[in-house]
Amino acid sequence: MEAEKFSAVMGMLVEQIVHLITENYAYDEMTASNEFYNSEVYALLEQEETKLWHFSPLTLFNLFDEETKTGGFELPEED
């Protein structure tokens, strides 16, 4: 994927995931953003070759939620 397209996809995904974090964790947007940007989920998401950007914002939020609660997460298998 071209860098510009990947950046656009990342921007949309991150915005939606941060919104889900604010709704589910009662964080303000800045705190939610910081928590997500410091997560392992985000570290993998920003690497285009991992293809995590194929997952929905809800799936990515659930991975973040699992990481937050347990310290780790397991990637779902794609069909």
Image (cartoon, rainbow, N blue to C red):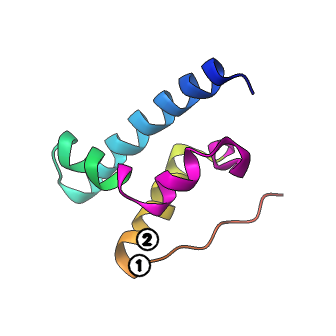
- Secondary structure state at the residue bearing disc 2: helix
For the residue labelled by badge 1, is the local secondary structure a helix, a strand or a loop?
Answer: loop
Q: Which disc number belongs to residue 51?
A: none
Magenta span includes 16 = no
Residue 49 is left or right of residue 24, and the answer is: right
Task: Check disc 2 and give the amino acid type.
Answer: Glu
Is 53 a magenta residue? Answer: yes
Look at the numbered discs 1 and 2 and tell me whether their residues touch, using CB distance below 8 Å: yes
17 sits left or right of 33 in the view: right
| Residue that sits furthest to the bottom in the current view | 70
Q: Residue 67 carries which label?
A: 2
User: Which quadrant of the figure contains the N terminus?
Assistant: top right
The C terminus lies in which quarter of the figure? Answer: bottom right
Q: Which amino acid does label 1 sit on?
A: Gly
Indicate the position of residue 76 as horizontal and vertical percent values: 68, 66
Q: Give the range drawn in magenta.
A: 37-54
Packing grade of label 1 (10 A; few <14, some 14-19, many >=20) is: few
Q: Position of residue 30 (x, y in %)?
A: 19, 41
From mark 1 to mark 2, how far is it between C-alphas? 5 Å
Disc 2 crowd, CA 10 A, few/some/many (<14, 14-19, 20+): some
Residue of label 1: 71
Q: In this view, does 27 lie above or below 7?
A: below
